[in-house]
Amino acid sequence: MVKKFPSALILVLPLLVVGLLLESALPTGWPRPELATLCLSVMALRYGNQPGTIFGILSGTIVGLFSDCAPGWLAMAYAALGGAIGAFLKPYSDRPFIYIFTVVTATVVFAAELTLLSIFGADVPSQIISRSWLWSALLWNFLFSWPMLWLTNKILGTYAFIPLELDCE
């Protein structure tokens, strides 16, 4: 079981890179999940605020290298998202539907972040600004949240939900 964040980072970042490589092989019009948001939600819920921010910076940089924008803006957007998830939702990570709620909320917040950044003139991916991207990403992130959680459980050797400790004597 992987309890330390650096070990989890070493295991999950290559998963994200492989997923992005496979996703980039698909034609541009095909629907696809927002893999970085899925990985970021799981990592921030499991490890908290600071690891969520660190994973957000790294995953935003990696996603920026695969897209048509500056990696710094995506790193900043993902870092803010990871820090917020880790700070506000980590205490509720033992509840079954917090992962789906987190993924859906993170997708909407991410689209809002990048829309605001584009209004202020930042170089962000052009497909994310469209309204159709948000609906497609919400649907695919919702569908892929449990398989991604299962896969990270297999890789990290942890359980999705922390069992409640009952003091029964």
Image (spheres, helix red, strand yellow):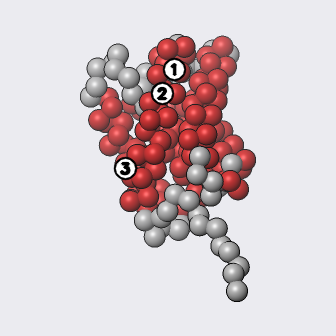
Secondary structure beneath label 3: helix
Q: Nearer the viewer, residue 54 or 158?
A: 158
Identify the element where label 1 is drawn: helix
x%, y% of residue 52? 60, 49
| Residue 169 position within the rendered picture, expressed as x and y whole percent measured from the top left | 70, 86
- Residue at the spot of label 3: 14
Instruction: Give the Cα separation between the discs numbered 1 and 2.
Output: 6 Å
Residue at figure coordinates x 29%, y 20% from the top left: 27
Residue tagged 2? 139
Residue located beneath label 1 in the image = 135
Callouts 1 and 2 close, C-beta under 8 Å:
yes
**Residue under the image location 61 percent in, 27 percent down:** 108
* Residue 140 in the image, given as x and y percentages of width and height: 44, 30
Disc 1 packing (10 Å; few <14; some 14–19; many ≥20)? some
**What residue lies at 68% left-to-right and 16% top-to-bottom?**
120
**How far from the left and from the top, in percent, is residue 126?**
49, 15
How far is the residue under mark 2 from the one under mark 3? 24 Å
**Which of the 4 quarters of the picture holds residue 143?**
top left
- Tell me which numbered mark, 2 or 3, is placed earlier along the sequence: 3
Specify few, some or many for label 2: CA neighbours under 10 Å numbering under 14, 14-19, or 20 or more: some
Q: How many other residues sit within 10 Å of disc 3, few (<14), some (14-19) or many (≥20)?
A: few
Q: Secondary structure at mark 2?
A: helix
Q: Nearer the viewer, mark 1 or mark 3?
A: 1
Corner quadrant of residue 19: top left
Amino acid on which disc 2 is placed:
Leu
Residue 78 showing in the rendered view: no
User: Hey, what amino acid is under mark 3?
Assistant: Pro
Mark 1 residue type: Trp
Picture residue at 37% right of the left edge, 49% below the top? 14
Depth check, mark 2 against mark 3: the one in front is 2
